[in-house]
Image (tube, rainbow, N blue to C red):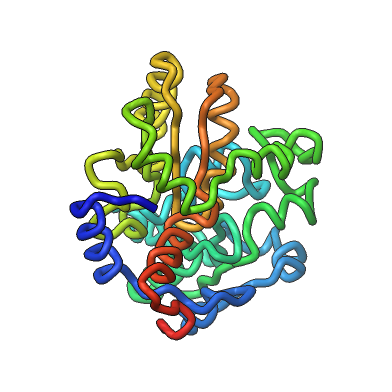
């Protein structure tokens, strides 16, 4: 991929200050957050009435697809811990956090923050939203409607048709002129000090739904192409619903997200990410 020197230097800085990525296994967060108790799908479905389920994702993701009966308290919010403390005052039920999928760390981060704040009886359901909806469609809601019909979910093939490899994503941004709008939609704690495309991208948290919609509609009206990336390529799947609803024709996502781009950069420099633990 072609990059200018400034972009390369800032990318290196972002790599150096970012958290080291966990080993790529089926549940990488379990090794990274060993202090966090986890709940399996079959365990959660059997005790749904006995726990409080908290969706730690953005309001946009929550509105799109959620576990039936869940409450939305984004872990990226500055008042997250205080909100959980207030919740604990009115219920002694165990609290279960969830997010998008196996490589999403938000459920673990939420649990860890609570443990550090001395909030007890918390755990993470870490298989994620999509697996839940596939396994238990009658206990999921798509735009508030349950059960979730497979036909109402954007097909995997349609989502994959919008994915670019990290190499192609970066190449397009640096080589296709000013007709692009680049959005980094990671949460602040995921993003760290800098994005990957300095001077060419805007950072927008998915929590800021109104500002995000403004970018989408402006790009559509100006006939520009949207290039969007998140942390691991999972959040953008729910963002696709907003893009399709806005009749946005030209948009692409970075496959595997920022972590995929990081791995690509390390590979180009001859550094294996397997041993970075």
Note whether residue 244 is visible. Answer: yes
The image shows residue 251, relative to residue 257, as above or below, that is: above
Q: How many marks?
A: 0
Which residue occupies the extreme top position in the image?
221
Q: Position of residue 213 (x, y in %)?
A: 42, 26
Q: Position of residue 134 (x, y in %)?
A: 77, 52
The image shows residue 19, relative to residue 87, as above or below, that is: below
Question: Relative to the observer, which residue lies in front, 130 or 125?
Answer: 130
Residue 259: quarter of image: bottom left
Q: Position of residue 143 (x, y in %)?
A: 64, 33
Residue 192: quarter of image: bottom left
Q: Position of residue 165 (x, y in %)?
A: 53, 51
Question: Relative to the observer, which residue lies in front, 38 or 203?
Answer: 203
Q: Is residue 30 left or right of residue 137?
A: left
Q: Is residue 211 left or right of residue 59?
A: left
Q: Residue at x 53, y 23 (%)?
A: 248
Q: Residue at x 39, y 70 (%)?
A: 266
Q: Quadrant of the C terminus?
A: bottom left
Question: Relative to the observer, which residue lies in front, 138 or 99?
Answer: 99
Note whether residue 77 is visible. Answer: no
Q: Residue at x 75, y 62 (%)?
A: 45
Q: Residue at x 60, y 37 (%)?
A: 64
């Amino acid at each position: 991929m072609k990059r200018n020197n400034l972009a390369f230097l800032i990318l290196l800085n972002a790599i150096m200050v970012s958290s080291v990525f966990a080993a790529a296994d089926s549940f990488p967060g379990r090794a990274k957050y060993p202090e966090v108790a986890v709940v399996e799908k079959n365990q959660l479905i059997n005790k749904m009435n006995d726990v409080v389920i908290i969706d730690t994702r953005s309001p946009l993701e929550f509105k799109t697809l959620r576990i039936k009966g869940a409450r939305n308290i984004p872990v990226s919010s500055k008042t997250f811990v205080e909100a959980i403390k207030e919740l604990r005052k009115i219920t002694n039920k165990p609290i279960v956090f969830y997010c998008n999928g196996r490589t999403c760390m938000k459920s673990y981060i939420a649990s860890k923050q609570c443990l550090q704040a001395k909030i007890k009886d918390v755990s993470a359901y870490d298989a994620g939203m999509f697996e839940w909806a596939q396994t238990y469609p009658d206990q999921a809601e798509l735009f508030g409607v349950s059960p979730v019909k497979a036909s109402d979910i954007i097909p995997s093939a349609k989502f994959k048709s919008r994915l670019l490899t990290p190499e192609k994503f970066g190449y397009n941004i640096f080589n296709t002129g000013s007709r692009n709008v680049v959005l980094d939609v990671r949460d602040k704690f995921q993003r760290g000090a800098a994005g990957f495309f300095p001077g060419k991208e805007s950072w927008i948290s998915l929590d800021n739904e109104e500002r995000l919609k403004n970018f989408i509609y402006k790009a559509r009206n100006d006939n520009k192409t949207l290039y969007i990336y998140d942390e691991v390529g999972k959040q953008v799947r729910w963002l696709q619903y907003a893009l399709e609803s806005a009749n946005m024709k030209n948009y692409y996502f970075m496959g595997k997200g920022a972590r995929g781009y990081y791995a690509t950069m390390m590979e180009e420099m001859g550094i294996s990410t397997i041993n970075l633990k």
